[in-house]
Image (cartoon, rainbow, N blue to C red):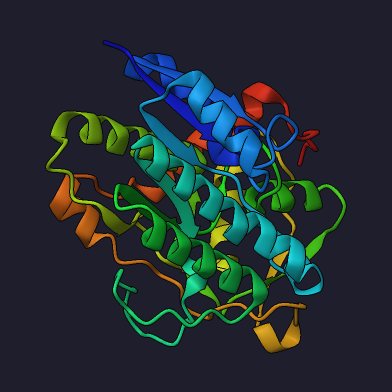
Amino acid sequence: MTKKIIVFGSRGQVGQKLLSFGSTHNLSIIGFSHGDIDITKERDVIAAIQDYDCDLVINAAAYTNVDGAEGEKEKAFSINFDGPAILAQACCDADIPLIHISTDYVFDGMKECGFIEDDPMLPLGVYGKSKLAGERAVRELLKKHIILRTSWVYSSSGNNFVKTMLNLSQEREELKIINDQIGCPTAAFDIAKTILELGNKIFLQRPKVKWGTFHYCGDTKLSWYEFACEIFRLAEDPLGVKTPKLYPVSTDEYPTIATRPSYSVLDCSRIGRVFGIYPAPFLNSLSHVIGELKTLDNIEIQKS
């Protein structure tokens, strides 16, 4: 029997990929964007879950503007805390599992090796604090949950570092890129595939599913500067993008409104041990996204 899934936040980077992959996984997926259903509206969330009579809920909705959250604390907490709490309670009442996407920014970055799921969570800014509050609400209200933390999400749609770099290359001959913040870039389609694989394992393993928190990200740790270098190296041929001169700078030289963790690498060992899911190769995923950009023509190509 085909399983039915609801995706909230269907117009986000991960949400779009979840909808596109549904048919290939023999799943019936319905997506709701913020314009369709506001996850902070309890009555609307409950009605959607009841009307669709689904087998799994995925929350890909989030307030993700890290700097903007500093000035919009109430909005960030409404979407990242109140929304997940409402979803978790609605899923509990309907006895439906929930997969909730979270972030590396729940950690302070003060570590020299990858963060594991049980490390102390000490977010540095409002965004991370609101996401941490959402995680805690899900844990407290719903036993049948998987919280999937990921990092540095990019894709051929939406706002992300890859598209920003490629678009800036058309306007500037030089770019200064932060070189002392380290993380693992993760393609949205890899996250979506992982979530759907988790969904299938939930359907197959119930009632023996290992619920809880898991990490998933790309397999390579690097700085934003190193990330930018790889973007332009891979994009130069297929997209014909003009590569600007790149200069590595420190966070102190390029301050932002919100403080970001200097090291936010996630250890993905647990999801491998429990579910047999392992990080995708970074360069393969980045090449795939650049290929999508060429197909979609999402950027105007400036010939070198």
Residue 236 visible somewhere in the drawing = no
Residue 153 position within the rendered picture, expressed as x and y whole percent measured from the top left: 54, 51
Q: Is residue 47 left or right of residue 193?
A: right
Q: Is residue 226 left or right of residue 251?
A: left
Q: Quadrant of the N terminus?
A: top left
Q: Which residue occupies the extreme right position in the image?
A: 171
- Which residue is nearer to you in this view: 94 or 182? 94
Q: Which residue occupies the extreme top position in the image?
A: 1
Q: Residue at x 19, y 52 (%)?
A: 272
Q: Residue at x 70, y 89 (%)?
A: 252
Q: Residue at x 75, y 80 (%)?
A: 254
Residue 26 position within the rendered picture, expressed as x and y whole percent measured from the top left: 33, 14
Quadrant of res 304: top right
Q: Residue at x 40, y 70 (%)?
A: 265
Residue 158 visible somewhere in the drawing = yes
Residue 173 position within the rendered picture, expressed as x and y whole percent measured from the top left: 83, 59
Q: How many marks?
A: 0
- Which residue is nearer to you in this view: 209 or 265? 209
Q: Is residue 45 above or below residue 123?
A: above
Quadrant of res 120: bottom left
Q: Is residue 225 above or below residue 234?
A: below
Q: Is residue 97 above or below residue 4?
A: below
- Which residue is nearer to you in this view: 49 or 147? 49
Residue 69 position within the rendered picture, expressed as x and y whole percent measured from the top left: 73, 68
